[in-house]
Image: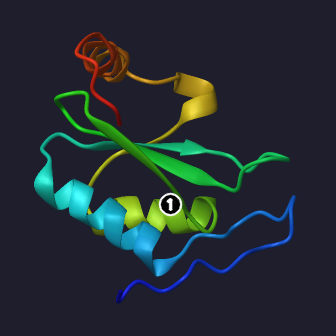
Amino acid sequence: MGLLPRRRQRPGTLRSASSGDIEHLTTFVREHGGVEAFLEPRTTVTDTTVVLVAGSGEWTRRRIEDSDAARTFAKKHAIPLYDAGLVGYPQRMRDWTARQKAGGEKR
């Protein structure tokens, strides 16, 4: 047991960033080298998110409160932050994902 049940939200309600999301991002930065952050703006179906991409191409995505919170996170961890809508994603991210799919691994 020990796990708490997930709170259910109304359908169509966006889930906001949690401390668990920030902890996950912090752990990713700590455990990977060459990390860059890519901000994804809020849309009608998703909240604001940040994608962290390691030098190896491994990546993770989590919700973040807003663009100010993303800038604060990036500054605190001394990593660059880019607007994904303007610069896109690095090729190493696509290459890493392709290798995972080819190997039959799940993210």
**Residue 75 sits in which quadrant?**
bottom left
> In the picture, residue 85 is in which quadrant?
top right
- Residues 33 and 86: in front is 33
Q: Position of residue 48 (x, y in %)?
A: 65, 55
The x, y position of residue 10, in whole percent, is 86, 70
In-front residue for pair 18/6: 6
Residue at 61% in and 69% down: 65
Residue 43: x and y, percent?
79, 45
Instruction: State the residue at coordinates (59%, 77%).
Output: 6
Mark 1 lies on residue: 70
Nearest the eye: 39 or 27: 27
Viewer-nearest residue: 68 or 4: 4
* Residue 88 position (above or below residue 49): above
Tell me the residue at 28%/65% (across/down): 26
Instruction: Give me the residue at 37% from left, 17% from top.
Output: 94
Q: Amino acid at mark 1?
A: Ala
- Please identify the quadrant where the C terminus is shown: top left
Disc 1 crowd, CA 10 A, few/some/many (<14, 14-19, 20+): many
Residue 18 position within the rendered picture, expressed as x and y whole percent measured from the top left: 53, 76
Residue 1, by quadrant, is bottom left
Q: Secondary structure at mark 1?
A: helix
